[in-house]
Amino acid sequence: VGLDDSEGKDVTVFATGTMVAESLKAAKALREAGKDVHVVNIHTIKPLDEAAVRETCGKSKLLVSVEEHSVSGGLGGAVSEAMSGVPGSPRLLRLGMPDKFVHPGEYPYLLEQYGLTAASISTGIQAELKK
């Protein structure tokens, strides 16, 4: 479900769980920097709304998945699978936990350590757009 009126010509962000709120904050910062950003709440990864993902492939320069889960086997992987076979698909930036042992800590600490705060999400997207 799209959470804003933006078309996402520059970026479409697919977020799940608590990362939806962080992604909305990041989108606001990116819009203030002149980027057209659309945020989509993916409330279920399986089944994934593959049609919604494929539809964005022709609209956005960059797709981003944001999850507080391993970047392997979660939302990013599902979005990647949905994009496969779509000619001219944009790049996909997968933001989430690394595919390795994660040192435990308090929730805010972990978000900061693994780049899942609004500021880190915004910075990561801006860097990827410059590539």
Image: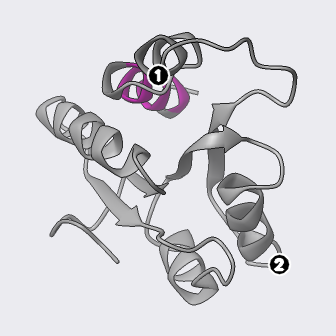
Q: Is mark 2 on a helix, strand or loop?
A: loop
Mark 1 or mark 2, which is nearer to you? 1
Say left or right for 102 vs 33. right
Say left or right for 91 vs 127. right
Q: Name the residue under label 1.
A: 107
Q: Does 54 sit above or below residue 33?
A: below
Location of residue 32 in the rendering, given as x and y in whole percent from the top left corner: 12, 32
Q: Mark 2 points at which residue?
A: 85
Which of the 4 quarters of the picture holds residue 82? bottom right
Disc on the earlier residue, 1 or 2:
2
Q: Does 26 sit above or below residue 4?
A: above
Residue at screen point 56% across, 71% down: 57
Location of residue 3 in the rendering, given as x and y in whole percent from the top left corner: 23, 67
Type of secondary structure dominating the magenta stretch: helix
Q: What element carries label 1?
A: helix
- Which residue range is magenta in the image? 120-128
